[in-house]
């Protein structure tokens, strides 16, 4: 079996709702291979093959003319965030991975983290780092800084908005002429240097040495935006943003504050990858290494679906309004007809199948997303989170005010 066959079969497998990897391999290549043989081959594969495959296959897709929603001014919109997948409780996993300790005891499953660099306008992954040795989200994200493409505006949450991380991100952005917009934690002390006409500030923060917080290694100057966000009739919430875009005329504070909300598209991407594509966050693999391979295949599958979603939109409708579930269903059936049954169809018939599938995708679009938010609370609070006793949501436009 070639590496190409394995990668294609594994990507096809994670896109299917039911069936084993051996069954899906037979559907694609019409060659029988037992599940035990698959397991043996996957365990012997070095991880570097999948890492190299993702570096070669994952790349930006949006163009400014056909997908303007994927850009802000001259910058391509990217986001960086992490999530976790659950590992099956097999002897191999329990021997090499530890379960987190929760309030009620040990967690049900061991977790495998992944950090993803995402093209927001298409839900297209550009790079991914997977925790095969139990690495933290921040450690995984640091591997992705070197993979930033040119001319992007990177969005990220409070985990990345600390001086030690910002120094690394800013150095990576300078190398490729890119910028960042992060949320800062409230506890970081900053000295205001200048207040700008749009309400933002030029600030200076201390960068402290790792493991020696009392020792200041250097000083970092950047731009801070404090904004109050909320809806009429509800309490406002203050956000503290920092950015490398120092010119307030080139990047007004109010526009950047409104733009930061696009970071939540990353959460919607994770929902599509877990709840629609796989219908669960529990991996089917029986070892940590094969679990990492499965996550890599999920990244490749979502990139393939993002490409087909973009081709179906063809600049006629916004890409993200095409239903992800419909795209998945059409691609599944098209893959079957053009793979397993390709010898029964002429080239013209195959082209007609593809065009009709794209027509179905363009027809199945969602309504324009309404402005809505839910309370930041949980039903079983942990570490000070407010308890959610009654479900409700807030609708209406968000009002922003620079403070």
Image: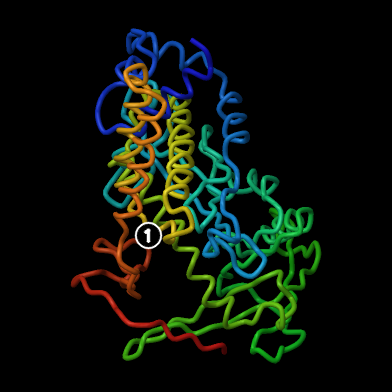
* Residue 95: x %, y % from top left: 41, 24
Residue that extends furthest to the left in the rendered view of this protein: 390
Residue 167's place in the image compared with 377, above or below, is: above
Which quadrant holds residue 338? top left
The quadrant of the image that shows the C terminus is bottom right
Q: Is residue 135 above or below residue 210?
A: above
| Residue highlighted by disc 1 | 321
Secondary structure type for disc 1: helix
Work out whether residue 339 or residue 256 is closer to the camera in this orientation and state it. 339
Quadrant in the picture for residue 206: bottom right
Residue at position x 64%, y 89% from top? 199
Residue depicted at x 51% and y 88%: 401
Q: Look at 66% across and 76% down and name the residue there.
A: 189
Q: Please tell me which residue lies in front, 349 or 368.
A: 349
Spot the residue most to the right: 218
**Foreground of the two, 132 or 363:** 363
* Residue in the picture at 41% in, 35% down: 98
Classify residue 352 as left or right of residue 228: left
Residue 130, given in percent of the width and then of the height, sits at 52, 38
């Amino acid at each position: 079996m070639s590496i190409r066959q394995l990668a294609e079969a594994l990507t096809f497998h994670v896109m299917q709702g039911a069936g084993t990897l051996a069954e899906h391999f037979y559907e694609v290549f019409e060659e029988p291979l037992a599940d035990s043989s698959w397991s043996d081959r996957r365990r012997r594969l070095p991880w570097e093959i999948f890492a190299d495959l993702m570096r070669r296959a994952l790349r930006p897709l949006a163009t400014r003319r056909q997908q303007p929603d994927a850009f802000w001014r001259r910058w391509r919109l990217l986001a960086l965030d992490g999530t976790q997948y659950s590992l099956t409780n097999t002897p191999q996993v329990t021997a090499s991975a530890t379960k987190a300790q929760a309030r009620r005891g040990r967690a049900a499953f061991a977790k495998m983290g992944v950090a993803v660099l995402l093209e927001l306008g298409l839900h297209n992954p550009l790079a991914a780092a997977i925790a095969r040795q139990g690495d933290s989200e921040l450690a995984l994200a640091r591997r992705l800084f070197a993979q930033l493409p040119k001319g992007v505006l990177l969005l990220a949450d409070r985990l990345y908005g600390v001086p030690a991380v910002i120094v690394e991100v800013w150095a990576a952005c300078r190398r490729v002429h890119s910028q960042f917009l992060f949320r800062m934690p409230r506890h970081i002390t900053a000295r205001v240097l200048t207040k700008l006409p749009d309400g933002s500030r030029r600030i200076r923060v201390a960068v402290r040495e790792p493991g020696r917080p009392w020792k200041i290694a250097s000083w970092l100057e950047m731009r801070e935006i404090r904004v109050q966000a909320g809806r009429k009739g509800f309490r406002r919430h203050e956000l503290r943003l920092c950015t490398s875009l120092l010119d307030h005329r080139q990047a007004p504070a109010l526009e950047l504050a409104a733009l930061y909300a696009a970071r939540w598209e990353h959460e919607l991407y994770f929902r599509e990858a877990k709840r629609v594509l796989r219908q669960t966050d529990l991996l089917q693999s029986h070892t940590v290494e094969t679990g990492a391979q499965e996550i890599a295949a999920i990244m490749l599958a979502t990139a393939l679906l993002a490409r087909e979603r973009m081709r179906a939109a063809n600049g006629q409708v916004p890409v993200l309004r095409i239903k992800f579930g419909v795209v998945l269903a059409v691609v599944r059936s098209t893959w079957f007809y053009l793979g397993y049954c390709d010898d029964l169809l002429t080239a013209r018939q195959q082209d007609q199948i593809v065009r009709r599938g794209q027509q179905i995708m363009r027809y199945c679009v969602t309504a324009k997303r309404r402005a809505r938010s839910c309370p930041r609370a949980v039903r079983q609070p942990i570490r000070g989170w407010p308890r959610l006793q009654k479900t409700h949501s807030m609708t209406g436009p968000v009002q922003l005010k620079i403070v």
